[in-house]
Amino acid sequence: MKRKVVYNRWKVPSEEIQKQQDFDSILKGLKKDSTGYWKSIGFWGTVGTSAVALFFVISQF
Amino acid sequence: MRTINPIYHHSDQMLNQEQEWIVSAKENPKYFAPLYEKYHEQIFRYVYQRMDDKQSAYDVTSQVFLKALKNIKKFEYRGVPLASWLYRIAKSEMNQAFRDKRAKRTINIDDTQVATFMEVFEEETNSINKKRLFNALSELNELDLQLIELRYFEERPYREIGDLLSFKENNAKVKTFRALEKLKKSFNKNSRL
């Protein structure tokens, strides 16, 4: 991995970092992420495969 | 050199308070807010120390807290501050950003740190030696660089370094010593610059 060396970089003041705090957007991201799973291919793939497997198991009896 | 990092080392009272916040956050993510406020700046500084772009560092910091919130239910209290867990998430998120080329791995060094190394190497602080040091730092492997950064740039105690890099405290000390030796060797190799 190539690296860059930076000498005597200006230190970001605490006030500036605090202004960037946004807990609400983190919470929104969390909500979006958890609802997103229901729409994901992974979720429906699992559901679909399980349904097909269940169908074959039931049809054996 | 500072031997105790006050941000990482907590009194029992502070640990208990933090533990209460964690229990509440497990019930409802909105109660994670005091932990976010407490650790946002130090996680940002840890990330930005290793990156060249401020906005990318803010983005990675947000990712760290999002991931922490997603996994807070799995978090098990081991008697150390939550910071230890957050730093490990930050390390993994940063590596992902470097792999995806969303950020460039950067070594940030200042006058004081250069002077510390010159003292350790028993060399004079001048522009030639500075260049030799920068080259030597660039040539270190990632683990050795991390050890040097954590110990000599950020002045973290070995216990914390071990925690961050998943080593025992004593092992962290030995590995840091070896990393410094390698840096010195590389610095001396660049003597003809």
Image (cartoon, coloured by chain):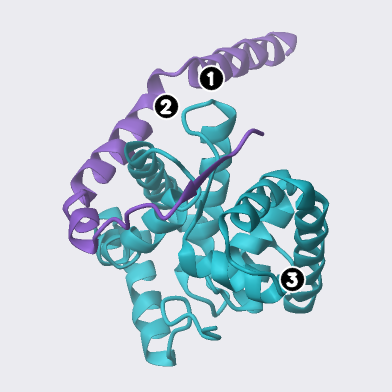
Chain colours: A purple, B cyan
Question: What residue appears at the point 51 percent right and 84 percent down from the top-left corner?
Answer: B2
| Quarter of the figure that contains the C terminus of chain B | top right
Amino acid type indicated by mark 3: Ala
How many neighbours does mark 1 have within 10 angstroms: few (below 14), some (14-19), or many (20 or more)? few
The answer to which of A56 and B152 lies nearer the viewer is B152
Discs 2, 1 touching: Cβ within 8 Å = yes
- Residue B96: give x, y in percent of width and height: 56, 35
Secondary structure at badge 1 equals helix
Residue lying at 32% horizontally and 58% vertically, measured from the top left = A11
Above or below, comparing residue A20 to residue A51 in the picture: below
Look at the image and tell me whether residue B125 can be seen: yes
**Most foreground residue, B190 or B14:** B190
Q: Amino acid at mark 1?
A: Gly
Where does label 3 land, which residue?
B172
Q: Position of residue B35 (x, y in %)?
A: 32, 65
How far apart are labels 2 and 1 at the CA level? Answer: 8 Å
Residue A3 is situated, as x and y percent measured from the top left of the image, at: 60, 38
Number of other residues with Cα within 10 Å of mark 3, as a class: few under 14, some 14 to 19, many 20 or more = many
Q: Residue at x 37, y 34 (%)?
A: A34
Instruction: Give the mark, 2 or 1, whose residue is nearer the N terminus.
Output: 2
Q: Amino acid at mark 2?
A: Tyr
- Tell whether B86 sits left or right of B143: left
Residue B153 seen in this snapshot: no
Task: Measure the C-alpha gap from mark 3 to mark 1.
Answer: 40 Å
Q: Quadrant of residue B52?
A: top left
Q: Is residue B170 left or right of residue B86?
A: right
- Residue A42's disc is 1
Identify the subunit bearing mark 1: A
Question: Residue B168: x percent and y percent?
Answer: 75, 73
Q: Is residue B10 left or right of residue B139?
A: left
Question: Is disc 2 placed on a helix, strand or loop?
Answer: helix
